Image (tube, rainbow, N blue to C red):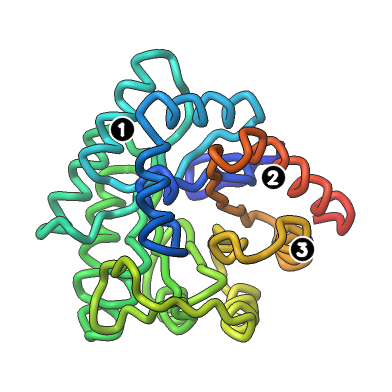
């Protein structure tokens, strides 16, 4: 596994995504509940151990109470995976949520994509600047996520961040609501993916490419081949897995990703 740098943090080029752990399938409410029932604390920890055995050194996961407690337990048991914490928009205080993530051991913190899209659309970018300063002052890596390409263009020009998290798709615009609404109609358009790819090529900081599988709508072989063709030096990729569907899903994803990168010299 190759590694990249997000500020001073070194992480594997393939990063484990945490959406399935928290029941965010971006498919149906029934699928959300299936993920929540499947991913007990024990099964999440088994998936983290498998990720480490495959050379994955980081997980992207929410800075909510469940994930914070789970990771502390996992580390106490000897786990070493690094946590890139995603702010949780249901918390009333962004500042308090960031402080909680850092106190729990986050190696980096990034602003949730829905929150970033919402604050940008509402003209509340001063809150984003405050967020960046708070994380920087704590001495951990800082990033912003976003589904809207315009968010990343603005951030590239106005923020001193360590990394972007660029979603390949903008399935439900968050201009009026930062949080994901279960059951809302979601559209995964390749035109949106292409627009984000065009923006990524001009960004000055590392990018974590995410939603690359369109929440399970793309064949993994096709998706990883596309990613490999557009991955810049220093960029990374995030994927979540649902081991109920396939206990070897993560192992297969690692092989597909590494094979795709090798074929194009990425």
Question: Closer to the N terminus: mark 2 or mark 1?
Answer: 1
Q: Residue furthest right?
A: 263
Q: Position of residue 34 (x, y in %)?
A: 41, 47
Residue at 35% in and 28% down: 41
Residue 105 visible in the current orientation? yes
Q: Which residue is mark 2?
A: 253
Q: Quadrant of the N terminus?
A: top right
Quadrant in which residue 127 is drawn: bottom left
Task: Using residue 176 as the reference point, say whether residue 167 is left or right of it.
Answer: right
Q: Label 2 to label 3, Cα distance in Å? A: 12 Å
Q: Which residue is mark 3?
A: 222
Q: Total of numbered circles in the picture? A: 3
Q: Quadrant of the C terminus?
A: bottom right
Residue 105: image tag: 1
Quadrant in which residue 71 is drawn: top left
Residue at 22% in and 61% down: 89
Q: Against 72, is 163 above or below? A: below
């Amino acid at each position: 596994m190759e590694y990249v740098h997000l500020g001073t943090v070194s992480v594997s080029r393939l990063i484990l995504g945490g959406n399935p752990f928290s029941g965010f399938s971006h498919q149906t409410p029934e699928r959300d509940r299936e993920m929540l029932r499947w991913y007990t604390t024990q099964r999440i920890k088994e998936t983290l151990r498998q990720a480490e055995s495959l050379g994955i050194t980081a997980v992207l996961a929410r800075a909510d109470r469940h994930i914070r407690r789970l990771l502390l337990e996992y580390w106490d048991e000897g786990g070493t995976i690094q946590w890139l914490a995603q702010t949780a928009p249901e918390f009333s205080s962004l500042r308090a949520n960031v402080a909680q993530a850092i106190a729990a051991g986050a190696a980096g913190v990034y602003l949730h994509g829905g929150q970033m899209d919402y604050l940008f659309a509402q003209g509340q970018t001063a809150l984003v600047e405050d967020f960046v300063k708070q994380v920087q002052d704590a001495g951990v890596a800082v990033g912003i996520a976003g589904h809207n390409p315009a968010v990343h263009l603005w951030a590239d020009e106005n923020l001193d961040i360590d990394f972007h998290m660029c979603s390949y798709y903008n399935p439900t615009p968050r201009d009026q609501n930062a949080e994901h609404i279960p059951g809302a109609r979601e559209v995964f358009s390749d035109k949106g993916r292409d627009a984000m790819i065009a923006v990524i090529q001009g960004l000055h900081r590392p990018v974590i490419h995410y939603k690359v599988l369109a929440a399970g709508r793309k064949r993994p072989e096709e998706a990883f081949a596309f990613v490999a063709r557009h991955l810049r030096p220093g960029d990374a990729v995030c994927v979540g897995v649902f081991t109920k569907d396939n206990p070897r899903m993560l192992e297969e994803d690692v092989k597909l990703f590494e094979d795709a990168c090798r074929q194009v010299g990425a």
